[in-house]
Image (cartoon, rainbow, N blue to C red):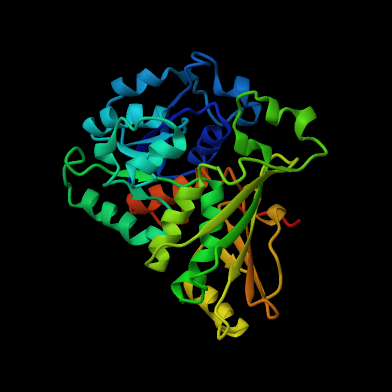
Amino acid sequence: MEVKKVAVVGGAGYAGIELVRYILGHPGFNLVAVTSDNDVGKPLTSLYPALLGKTNLAFSPHSAIDSLAELDAVFLAVPHTAAMAMAPKLVSQGRIIFDLSADFRLKDIRTYEQWYGAVHTAPELVAGAVYGLPEINRSLLLQKCAERIMNLSPVDNPVLIACPGCYPTASILAVAPALVMGAVDEDAPIVINALSGVTGAGRAAKHTSHYCTVDENVNAYSVATHRHTPEIVQVLSWEAGMPVQVVFTPHLIPMKRGLLATVAIQVKKKITADQLKAAYQEVYGDEPFVQVLPYGAMPRTASVAMTNNAQIGLMLDEFTHTLIVGCAIDNLGKGAASQAIQCANIVFDFDETTGLLATPGVA
């Protein structure tokens, strides 16, 4: 295995430091730099003592990435707009980019600018960016791997992987097989209710994520206005081969990490529970990180914590012809950092599971 030199930009945040954790345990990656403009010079272990004995790196400024020689890949764990500001220069330097922000996920620039309230400053990179959900887009990730192996110019053929976040990942995985089999009633919206741990709000102090606000409390937020809605619609429409309707409502719950999406899908009356079970098993039966539970069992966030796993449960309400699907993931794992590592494994032609086979919890 040829070891690749990689850097994490934005490594002080929760998703960034989770990337660091996975990379330090990955046999194919050599972590050469971790950046944080707010923490320059501080050892990583001063912020995250759990890494004592694992790394001697200190935080560098973001600009330090420009001077690193022979850097194979950069993981961007920075907010939206920050990623698009950095990506063009990284592409010009021939870096492979795994972006955890939303800047390159939406293919329609106007949609991005409408929902994110910002002008997109790198629209030339959007069309070629690959949506980094392996279970949906593995063929395009493999295509980027092939281009790399053929030594195509990384400047003329940039490898920019737009890794989805936690809400889209869980929602899309929950719904995709039903769309692929043509089971969904086209006249009814897909209703997604999703609950996320507080780390999904990021490390920066905000009133809405303070302990006293979150503890002993559950609330919906960004109702009918959440920025991930058009991303979910985009990818599910790809899977359906036509536009779909989505009602997406996120909730903040008083726990550190984990995400559970519960989806109600109106299905055609002729569709049976056995057909639905078979469809989900066919789509995910060979996937290393997606597990379909026995029919009627629903997933638990504790069962996927600290892993790249997604667990899916389904049940058909025979009275209303409504399929109920639950999908549990770790919002910092499959919903962020470990998913980016999974994409990197594919692009660099490593075994897809390399560095990601942590034993899950037993709760």
Q: Is residue 308 left or right of residue 156?
A: right
**Is residue 189 placed above or below 258 in the rendered structure?**
below
**Most foreground residue, 354 or 287:** 287
Is residue 119 depicted above or below 161 in this figure?
A: above
Height in image: 204 above or below 195?
A: above
Q: Name the side, left or right, on which 52 lies relative to 66.
A: right
Q: Position of residue 318 (x, y in %)?
A: 68, 81
Query: Which residue is depicted at the point 53% across and 57% down?
Result: 246
Please state the horizontal and vertical placement of residue 56, each as a whole percent of the image: 52, 23
Q: Residue furthest top?
A: 41
Location of residue 69 (image quadrant): top left
> Which of the two residues, 76 or 112, is positioned nearer the viewer here?
112
Label tally? 0
- Identify which residue is drawn at 48% across, 53% down: 232
Residue 334 can be seen, yes or no: no
> Which of the two residues, 4 or 295, is positioned nearer the viewer here?
295
Q: Position of residue 308 (x, y in %)?
A: 55, 52
